[in-house]
Image (cartoon, coloured by chain):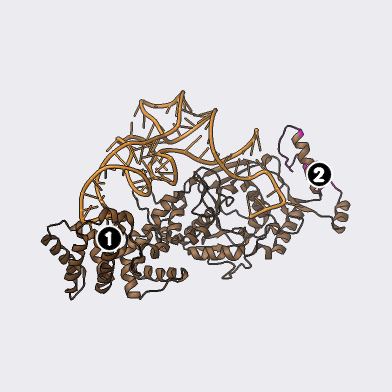
Amino acid sequence: MKVRTRFAPSPTGFVHIGGLRTALYNYLFAKKHAGTFILRIEDTDRTRFVEGATENLLSVIEWAGLTPDEGPAGGGRFAPYYQSQRTEIYVRFAQQLLDKGFAYYAFDTPEDIEALRKKAQENGGQPPKYDYQTRGQMRNSLTMSAAQVKDALAAGVPHVIRLKIPSERVFEVNDLIRGAVTFHSSQVDDQVLLKSDGYPTYHLANVVDDHLMEITHVIRGEEWLSSVPKHLYLYECFGWQAPQMAHLPLIFNPDGSKMSKRDITSLTALPAGKVDPDVASYIKKGYEKEAIINYIALLGWNPGEGDERQVFTLAELVNEFSLERVNKSAAIFDLKKLDWLNAQHIMRRNIDELTDQVIQDLQTQQHEIPARKYLKQVVELMQPRLPFRTQFYDLSVYFFKDPEQYDPEVVKKRWKEDSIKLILEFVTESAKLEVYEKTAIEHTLHTIAEREQVGLGRIIHPIRLAVSGTGAGPGLYEMLEVLGKETVIRRLQTAVKKIPALI
RNA sequence: GGUCCCAUCGUCUAGUGGUUAGGACGCUGGCCUCUCACGCCGGAAACCGGGGUUCAAACCCCCGUGGGACUACCA
């Protein structure tokens, strides 16, 4: 059977890091097995409707490169992929359950439920449970006569449809990650299947759609593990075969708490021990999508013994992925490794591609776009020293503008009494160079150093300072070559006048 | 509280009865070198505790402990 997986998020306003990983694993598993990856929007909670949430969701998934084979954007055999547009389907199947006696109407008001809760609490502080023990005392089609039910329905009394969980059953799931997990039905309550507003709850919609959409593998977060018995029972009632299940470990903050959007305003001012769960924040900060994908893939999965690679492309992940290698234990989200991976992916990028991306960054940052040929040379020099692509301009301004300031620390450390003399000598010598290129520059510098009986650093550092205003950057010879003779000489002459005043 | 899940360096992890417990990030010593990076070599750093089973346990079993999820007409 062809593998079909789905990512079924509910549009809450932002995409959670953990959600993205769930999407990724579903994608990887499907692609690994030449299967189909489906995106389904679980928007059955009208009270939590957030304007634009779905659009945001779609764009983040697309950004990550996890393009669904079927979903809201692309259509597909099983459209619509919005649960809010499939309500008749759920009503129909709920009715089926009702007809078979697997479900019942419940007319309890919120006050009735509240009373149940109170009573339960008085009897030993246990949380309330609408189940085989209590349903006999509530207002539902099990306790009311057929006529009463009919009247109530006809009168439009608000009601829900609940699943009638049997009292003595053991449900067992063979989770692909956790192995056999068993649940006793006495611990399961009579879950609401269809809400009083006519919308289904997750449990009904999920099972119905997974079946209808022919999902073969349900890969989702561990928070769903405890509702598996309800789902298993639903499949049984419908007479359907349940898909394979795999419950992923959770991802937590560095302090072990749950990742939450609360109290997080920016990635640069995170509360201690906390991390931003919103994928959009990382995109905004300028992380490479490859780095994010790579990092979250490694949060709970690894290629296995003997394979010590850390850096993976999406294609490589597809090739290597397997559910058997997914961990059981929760992971902590650590920015440090993400940052490292970010630099790694920048370093591995094809130079033309990187240049194109830098051009786009410069555009969004409203900087002037230099000639591509020149920019590409700069990009090449900066590639191994770029923590973030978006920092390109700030880290290499001096390739685009003459320095306006000279780092005081560097002036103090590198500017000596003979600096002016050496620089002027270099100006004179380099003026003679016909081809201004790194080996010629290096040769010239060596010549001067020898003639003046000074170490090479004595001349190189002041030149770097004079030309760039900083003490860090690419190799000086390459840097000067890219900058070009004219610019270098101009900057040196300016610096020779300005720097002495700073001492 | 109940049910369920989980437990190897600070973090991500390898490991499925016999290993000097391996790798990666981070930290750190050094090398490379004109600086900063990159890269390379080295170091510190872990099997939650207690019982079993076994000639032998990080690995299997039990009990603790700790963490977590669920316990909604939210997903």
Q: State which region is magenta.
A: A122-144
Q: Colour of chain A?
A: brown
Tell me the subunit letter for badge 2: A
Q: Which residue is mark 1?
A: A500
* Residue A428 point in image, percent of width and height: 17, 70
Amino acid type assigned to the residue bearing label 2 in the image:
Met
Q: In this view of the protein, which residue sits in the foreground, A269 or A303?
A: A269
Q: In this view of the protein, which residue sits in the foreground, B13 or A468?
A: A468
Where disc 2 sits, the SS reads loop
- The residue under the point 41% across, 73% down is A368
Q: In this view of the protein, which residue sits in the foreground, A91 or A297?
A: A297
**Dividing the image into 4 quarters, which one contains the C terminus of chain A?**
bottom left
Residue A177 counted in the magenta span: no
Tell me the subunit letter for badge 1: A
Residue A130 counted in the magenta span: yes
Q: What mark, if any, has residue A203 been given in the picture?
A: none
Is the residue marked by circle 2 packed among few (<14), some (14-19), or many (20+) residues within 10 Å? some
Where disc 1 sits, the SS reads helix
* Marks 1,2: beta carbons within 8 A: no
Q: Is label 1 on the same chain as label 2?
A: yes
| CA distance separating discs 1 and 2 | 90 Å
Task: Name which of mark 1 and mark 2 comes first in the sequence.
Answer: 2
The chain coloured orange is B
* Residue A74 point in image, percent of width and height: 56, 70
Image-quadrant location for residue A55: bottom right
* Residue A421 point in image, percent of width and height: 19, 63
Going by the image, does B71 lie left or right of B50? right
Q: Which residue is mark 2?
A: A138
Amino acid type assigned to the residue bearing label 1 in the image:
Pro
Is the residue marked by circle 1 packed among few (<14), some (14-19), or many (20+) residues within 10 Å? some
Q: In this view of the protein, which residue sits in the foreground, A111 or A320?
A: A111
